[in-house]
Image: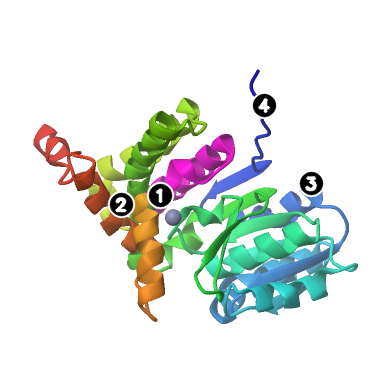
Amino acid sequence: MKEPKRIELPREVWIGPRVIARITDVCKRLCPGKHALIIADATTSKLVGAGVQRSLNRAGFEAECSIVNQADMATVAKVRKLVKDKVNFLLGVGGGTCIDVAKLASFKEGKPFISVPTAASHDGIASSRASIKGGRKPTSIETHAPIAIVADTLIIKRAPHRLLAAGCGDLVANFTAVRDWDLAHRLFGEPYSEHATALSLLGSQIVMENAELIKKHTEESVRKVVKALISSSVAMGIAGSSRPASGAEHLFSHALDQLNPKPALHGEQCGVGAVMMAYLHGEDWQASERRSAR
Ligand SMILES: [Zn+2]
């Protein structure tokens, strides 16, 4: 008989223009207590964090903000000290760094956290895995899924186009990740989920089919990418591992991170890695079928 399976998913996902205005209602519904800690960086605290803090305080919460510069264990330890007995829930406001720190610190302290992405550059905005740097190599740690995601597409649209393109790269990587997973299943009997595979592939198909629309960098472009990133995270939640969205193309990206003190963006490296791995799998790595079908 198969082992029972636990799937952890966010309770609420808000995507669209000006959904940031819903944040206090989301906190009231889902979060215990009044004490909130916002994790932001120097830029996102000014652009979004300060506004969120004001709205929460006006609504009767006691919100504080902690500025972080990197997602390493020392920063997570500092945030955990702030959280300890006083803070009831956390909000990660920013890109990968802020969300990863909020994710791991809240998990270690047994508190819920809300993901408020300001860019759509990788699928960590909604997943339960935190990428922590500072060791010999960056490590991906299994934590918990955000209790809610509040992805304001007008805020995310303000981020440079390069970040949105990197998010597409991280999604294209799903295409080769599921092929590696299939191999691991067939050769080594690794547990495999066709539901997770289908959902993961849907994310990469949507960005490939909408490349021209996404290139225009409109609110609709952002919405398409954010939804695909969230479905990619849900695929990982169903699988109970990062397999549906991380294969050899991610190992290629991790190797670049170790070799280069200033590597390119995670999604950019994974996207290039996916082209190489598609070639090695004997797949249509130039996506020529897709182009000739148009
Ligand atoms: Zn990734």
Between the C-alphas of marks 1 and 2, the distance is 8 Å
Please name the residue that numbered disc 1 is placed on.
225
Q: What is the three-letter code of the residue carrying label 1? A: Val
Secondary structure type for disc 1: helix
* Mark 2 and mark 3 residues within 8 Å of each other at the beta carbon: no
Q: Which residue is mark 3?
A: 29
Type of residue at label 3? Arg
Q: Which residue is mark 4?
A: 3
Amino acid type at image mark 2:
Ile
- In the displayed structure image, the side of residue 64 where residue 184 appears, left or right: left
Q: Nearer the viewer, mark 1 or mark 3?
A: 1
Asked whether disc 1 touches disc 2, contact meaning CB atoms under 8 Å apart, the reply is: yes
User: Would you call the spot at circle 3 few (<14 residues within 10 Å), some (14-19), or many (20 or more)?
Assistant: few
State which quarter of the image contains the C terminus.
Answer: top left
Distance Cα–Cα, label 3 vs label 4: 33 Å
Q: Earlier in the sequence, mark 2 or mark 3?
A: 3
Q: Earlier in the sequence, mark 3 or mark 4?
A: 4
N-terminal label among 1 and 2? 2
Between 37 and 284, the residue placed more toward the observer is 284
Q: Give the vertical position of 263 relative to 122 (above or below).
A: below
- Element under disc 3: helix
* Mark 3 or 4, closer to the camera: 4
Q: Earlier in the sequence, mark 2 or mark 4?
A: 4
The correct choice, above or below, for 92 with respect to 214 in the image is below
Q: Which residues are magenta?
A: 218-247
Percent position (x, y) of residue 17?
51, 53
